[in-house]
Amino acid sequence: MKNTSFFLMTLILALASFLSCNRTMQEVESNINYSDTTFWYSCGDTTKAADVFYVYPTVSAISFADNDSSLFADITLPEVREEANGNQRFNKMLYGEYNFYAPYYRQMIFEAYQQPIPVLDSLAQIAAKDVNDAFQYYMANYNHGRPFFLMGHSQGSQMLIELLKHGMTEEQRKLMVAAYCIGYHVSAEELAYYPEALKPATDSTMQGLVVFNSVTDTTAIGMVSRGDVVGINPTTWTMATDTVPAEFHLGMAKYNDTRDSVLIVPCPTRTYLYKHNTVCPDLDPEMVFIPAYEKMFPKGNLHFADSWLFGGNVVENMRCRLRHFGE
């Protein structure tokens, strides 16, 4: 079973570029001015009762000034912003019940993940600062007291977890319905150190942090989700480990070319939790497998599908959490 959505094709092409390059770190001191709408994919709608603040995953293969000397995306370039637009457009349609706010940010490009941890940490600080700055601008100028969801995938989720840990006030947290940090992980150390900021949601209604990662079998757990301690099963929104029947999967989100829309289509699979990863034994392990990236995402790892594989469940769960918000 394959999802041929356009942003997955973009991802595969960008990964091919990633494999052919080696780059080094470059210092960056400038800030992004989020009062300039150039640096927002979407920030104008206020007609709906709740908001989504969305942070896209790693999509960029174009570095700062495209000068082969840095490892983060230069969002002052139109072509860099364009790299993110397919993913953001898909998600704006998927979460169309809500006002959609989506900033561009100087994310780590694909090549960064070959670098030593100190370099990665420095790069992550650039991306995290942009996301924090964009969120603070959103809260001060766009939110107007409405409840909101944080939504992200992969690197986007990583940056949202940093925002939860370091960037949100208690008053802001009170307006957050849930933080869907899909395709990333939270360690036991983080959970212990930030007990107020990282409160896992353990059922389908409570406010808090929602994390999930999926695989087709237990041997396919990759680097991104290894060691996660808060992963939940998105077909039941619990941390129970028993096998869940296929009818609990409410369908995957898929782009429809003829209608220019996102549809929820059947994707039946049983699920169960293993080490906080959602195992989907009935899905094809080749579903989103990229051989060149096998070390990080072995065959059967569904990281590149996580943001749409449980689309029907996520959309319905957002409605449920919003209904119970403030109880």
Image: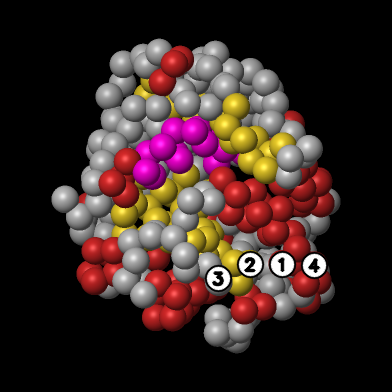
Q: Quadrant of the N terminus?
A: top right
Residue at position x 52%, y 61% in the image: 100
174, above or below 247, in the image: below
Amino acid identity at mark 1:
Arg
Q: CA distance from mark 2 to mark 1?
A: 8 Å
Q: Earlier in the sequence, mark 4 or mark 2?
A: 2
Q: Residue 43: which numbered mark, if any? A: 3
Camera-nearest residue between 106 and 21: 106
Q: Residues within 10 Å of mark 4 (few under 14, many from 20)?
A: few
Circles 2 and 1, Cβ within 8 Å, touching? The answer is: yes
Q: Position of residue 159 (x, y in %)?
A: 47, 61
Amino acid identity at mark 3:
Cys
Q: Is residue 40 left or right of residue 227?
A: right
Question: Which residue has dot 2 on it?
Answer: 41
Q: Secondary structure at mark 3?
A: loop
As drawn, the residue found furthest toward the left would be 327
Q: Position of residue 88 (x, y in %)?
A: 63, 56
Q: Secondary structure at mark 1?
A: helix
| 311 in magenta | yes
Nearer to us: label 4 or label 2: 2
Question: Which residue has dot 1 on it?
Answer: 81
Q: Residues within 10 Å of mark 3 (few under 14, many from 20)?
A: some
Residue at position x 53%, y 67% in the image: 45
Residue at position x 49%, y 33% in the image: 312
Circles 4 and 1, Cβ within 8 Å, touching? The answer is: yes
Nearer to us: label 1 or label 3: 3
Q: CA distance from mark 4 to mark 3?
A: 20 Å
Amino acid identity at mark 4:
Glu
Question: Which residue has dot 4 on it?
Answer: 79
- Magenta stretch in the rendered image: 304-319
Q: Earlier in the sequence, mark 2 or mark 1?
A: 2
Amino acid identity at mark 2:
Tyr
